[in-house]
Image (cartoon, rainbow, N blue to C red):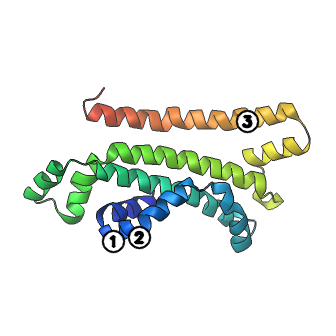
């Protein structure tokens, strides 16, 4: 969020930045995050920094693109009304643009979380090292190596459970709040 939000605002608001970085963001979003594991291991080694890098590369493009999409859908009338009332610059961004772009931003955050979760699982499966500990991805890989089909399905169910829990506990209430605040529920 700390990287994707300012990046998304910058791409959405500055035309030459959009022309230069917009296609790269879209390309990065479509690139499977598992592709980042080998270079991250080479550059950063088998450590938590490698995991964080892979997770960020999985999440940031989705968050930024979601915000760009949300900003693109802000009615121009809102922006003109905000300027008329003195909401320009950061004040306009904070009070007009971000609240109006919230549905797209929340969708980007949800997708960013899903991509980061997948990135973490891929990194744990590919880059195993005792110092990293055993996460769900590593549990899945260990079960595969041992040909323990019961443990494979247990790991899959745990990964699925975490995904469902995050959706139910974080994103569903947030989406309901956004819809309710807009009179859509």
Counting from the top left corner in percent of width and height, residue 142 is at 85, 46
Q: Secondary structure at mark 2?
A: helix
Secondary structure type for disc 3: helix
Compared to residue 162, the image places residue 27 above or below, namely below
Q: Which residue appears farthest toward the top when viewing the image? A: 185
Query: In screen coordinates, is 145 left or right of 60?
Result: right
**Of all residues shown, which one is farthest toward the left?**
84
Residue 86 falls left or right of residue 11: left
In this rendering, would 158 be left or right of 128? left
Residue at position x 69%, y 68% from top? 39
Q: CA distance from mark 2 to mark 1?
A: 6 Å
Mark number for residue 156? 3
Which residue corresponds to the image point at 78% horizontal and 50% vertical from the top-left?
Answer: 134
Q: CA distance from mark 1 to mark 3?
A: 44 Å
- Category of crowding for the residue at label 3, using alpha-carbon neighbours closer than 10 angstroms: few (below 14), some (14–19), many (at least 20): some
Picture quadrant where residue 144 is located:
top right
Q: Quadrant of the N terminus?
A: bottom left
Q: Which residue is mark 1?
A: 16
As drawn, is 184 to the left or to the right of 173? left
| Element type where label 1 sits in the image | helix
Residue assigned mark 2: 20
Front-most of residues 139 and 8: 8
Q: Label 2, label 3: how many angstroms apart (C-alpha)?
A: 39 Å
Q: In the image, is residue 135 above or below residue 164? A: below
Indicate which disc, 1 or 3, sits on the residue closer to the N terminus: 1
* Local crowd size for mark 2, using a 10 Å CA cut-off: few (<14), some (14–19), many (≥20): few
Q: Quadrant of residue 42?
A: bottom right
Q: Contact (CB < 8 A) between labels 2 and 1?
A: yes
Tell me if residue 168 can be seen: yes
Residue 124: x and y in percent read 74, 53
- In percent of width and height, residue 108 lies at 44, 48
State which quarter of the image contains the C terminus: top left
């Amino acid at each position: 969020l700390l990287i994707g939000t300012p990046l998304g605002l910058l791409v959405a608001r500055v035309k030459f930045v959009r022309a230069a970085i917009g296609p790269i963001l879209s390309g990065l979003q479509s690139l499977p995050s598992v592709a980042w594991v080998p270079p991250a291991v080479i550059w950063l080694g088998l450590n938590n920094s490698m995991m964080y890098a892979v997770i960020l590369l999985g999440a940031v493009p989705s968050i930024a693109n979601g915000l760009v999409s949300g900003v693109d859908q802000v009615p121009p009338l809102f922006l003109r009304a905000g300027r008329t009332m003195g909401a320009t610059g950061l004040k306009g961004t904070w009070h007009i643009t971000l609240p109006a772009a919230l549905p797209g931003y929340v969708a980007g955050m949800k997708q960013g979380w899903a991509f980061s979760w997948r990135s973490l699982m891929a990194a744990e499966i590919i880059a195993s090292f005792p110092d990293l500990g055993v996460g769900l991805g590593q549990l899945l890989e260990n079960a595969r190596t041992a040909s323990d089909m019961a443990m494979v399905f247990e790991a899959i169910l745990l990964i699925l459970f975490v995904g469902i829990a995050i959706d139910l506990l974080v994103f569903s209430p947030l989406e309901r709040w956004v819809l309710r605040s807009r009179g859509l529920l």
